[in-house]
Image (tube, rainbow, N blue to C red):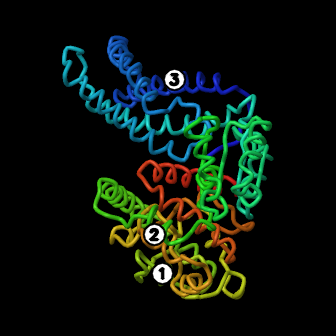
């Protein structure tokens, strides 16, 4: 996840800014924790006690951040693992603080409740600072020069995206096809890399032609350490936040996609689903009478609809929603636009814009058929059609579908649409879905949840 920027800093100054920004988040989080804990600004002696005790912890926490690699130079370029590392590191820091207060009761404060509050506030704060604020205020004075050895439309997309946007911390100054390099032109390649003054070599190692010169790349990058090495598909994922579909073979799924199993992540995700489902249920009960009255002004019709949709592992389920169209054509195999008679009502447009039409699915969440976060499931007929037209499409159902997901917060659809309207758009959505399935974690789920709320508020404010 690499974002746009507005100010210019070199890498060294960016890391200094990152360090002091982290410290500022720690201090601000403690201040907000005290306000929440005591219902206002506490007495001066309480503030001094907390900041005195936490001051030492802040120094330890920054050291833990350093040990976790959060101040390494490559954190400025590769950020896909950052949410998970941040989440785990901050949980470790809170556990470290709890242990310190337990072993040193003479500190004089009992911060059990404060630590719980601080955990929530600091996680939101550090995520906001690291993932959204900091990237918008930093970009390199000098971009890292890189060579790319690969071919195909996805290689062209990567070169165009990176080279035309100065916000990225590297630039492809040398691009060659694996066929061009071959086994007999390694010496020429070394000369080109040296003359181009590149420090990073990105290679499509899965290309059949690349196997001829991979031993030379290994020697240059690993043994002699003349260049850094990065796999093309990893860089592509970092830039676009999705999996390149040309990579997909069954061996890729065997290496990267694990079926869900009992784990702390699965347990925690289910707990969050239940809490979120209950909250959605409360909103649904409160909103239902008002939605029904509004719908009656547009004509007769049901308040709720039940759509036949696909669940985990391709099972069938009924998804419940507020009706947003004139008719319940829920089992259609057609794309929007092929049946123009069934249009979205004015009330339905408001429901969709606010995502309120999705809230009755709290029933599916509590039943365990849906999760708050996961790949969006398809209407049964349409899902069958897509599975016939797009290779490996059914693999996305290896995990439980969700109401919102990685594709929904990243992909831009046609003007005025909130979902794919063509096979090509669905392929892009699939690339995002596989990225989520590969990298799913509580940290990534937190990012998706926060960005979903942001998008919902943005849509509402744009009325």
67 left or right of 112 in image: right
Find numbered disc 1 in the image and state the secondary structure of the residue it sits on.
strand
256 relative to 12, above or below: below
| Residue identified by numbered label 3 | 24
| Residue identified by numbered label 2 | 401
Residue 72: quadrant of the picture: top right
Q: Residues within 10 Å of mark 3 (few under 14, many from 20)?
A: some
- Viewer can see residue 61: yes
Q: Residue at x 44, y 38 (%)?
A: 123
Label of residue 309 in the image: 1
Image coords of residue 21 (percent x, y): 55, 25
Image coords of residue 71 (percent x, y): 52, 29
459 relative to 198, above or below: below
Residues at marks 3 and 1 touching, judged by CB atoms closer than 8 Å: no
Of 206 and 15, the residue lying toward us: 206
163 left or right of 356 in image: right
In the picture, the quarter occupied by the C terminus is: bottom right
């Amino acid at each position: 996840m690499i974002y746009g920027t507005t100010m210019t800093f070199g890498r060294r100054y960016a890391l200094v800014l990152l360090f002091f920004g982290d410290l500022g988040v720690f201090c601000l989080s403690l201040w907000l924790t005290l306000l929440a804990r005591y219902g206002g600004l506490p007495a001066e002696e309480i503030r001094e006690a907390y900041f005195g005790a936490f001051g030492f912890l802040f120094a330890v926490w920054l050291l833990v951040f350093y040990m976790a690699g959060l101040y390494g130079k490559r954190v400025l370029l590769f950020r896909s693992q950052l949410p998970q590392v941040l989440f785990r590191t901050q949980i470790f820091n809170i556990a470290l603080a709890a242990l310190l207060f337990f072993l040193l009761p003479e500190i004089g404060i009992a911060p059990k409740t404060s630590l719980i509050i601080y955990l929530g506030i600091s996680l939101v704060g550090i995520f906001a600072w690291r993932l959204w604020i900091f990237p918008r205020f930093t970009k390199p004075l000098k971009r890292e020069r890189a060579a790319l050895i690969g071919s195909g439309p996805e290689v062209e997309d990567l070169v165009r995206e990176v080279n035309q946007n100065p916000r990225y911390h590297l630039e492809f100054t040398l691009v060659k096809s694996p066929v061009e390099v071959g086994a007999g032109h390694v010496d020429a390649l070394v000369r080109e890399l040296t003359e181009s003054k590149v420090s990073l070599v990105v290679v499509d190692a899965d290309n059949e032609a690349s196997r001829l010169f991979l031993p030379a790349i290994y020697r240059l990058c690993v043994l002699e350490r003349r260049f850094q090495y990065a796999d093309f598909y990893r860089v592509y994922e970092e830039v676009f936040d999705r999996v390149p579909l040309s990579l997909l073979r069954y061996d890729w799924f065997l290496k990267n996609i694990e079926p869900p199993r009992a784990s702390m992540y699965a347990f925690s995700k289910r707990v969050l689903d239940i809490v979120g489902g209950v909250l959605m249920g409360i909103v649904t009960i409160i909103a239902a009478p008002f939605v029904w009255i509004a719908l009656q002004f547009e004509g007769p019709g049901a308040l709720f609809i039940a759509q036949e949709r696909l669940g985990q592992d391709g099972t069938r389920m009924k998804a419940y929603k507020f009706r947003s169209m004139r008719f319940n054509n829920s089992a259609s195999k057609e794309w929007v636009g092929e049946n123009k008679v069934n249009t979205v009502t004015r009330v339905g447009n408001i429901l969709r814009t606010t995502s309120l039409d999705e809230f009755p699915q709290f029933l599916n969440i509590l039943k365990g058929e849906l999760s708050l976060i996961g790949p969006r499931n398809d209407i049964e007929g349409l899902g069958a059609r897509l599975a016939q037209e797009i290779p490996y499409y059914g693999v996305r159902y290896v995990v439980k579908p969700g109401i919102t997901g990685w594709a929904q917060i990243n992909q831009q659809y046609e003007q005025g649409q909130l979902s794919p309207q063509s096979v090509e758009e669905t392929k892009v959505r699939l690339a995002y879905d596989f990225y989520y399935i590969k990298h799913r974690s509580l940290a990534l789920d937190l990012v998706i949840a926060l960005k979903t709320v942001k998008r919902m508020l943005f849509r509402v404010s744009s009325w």
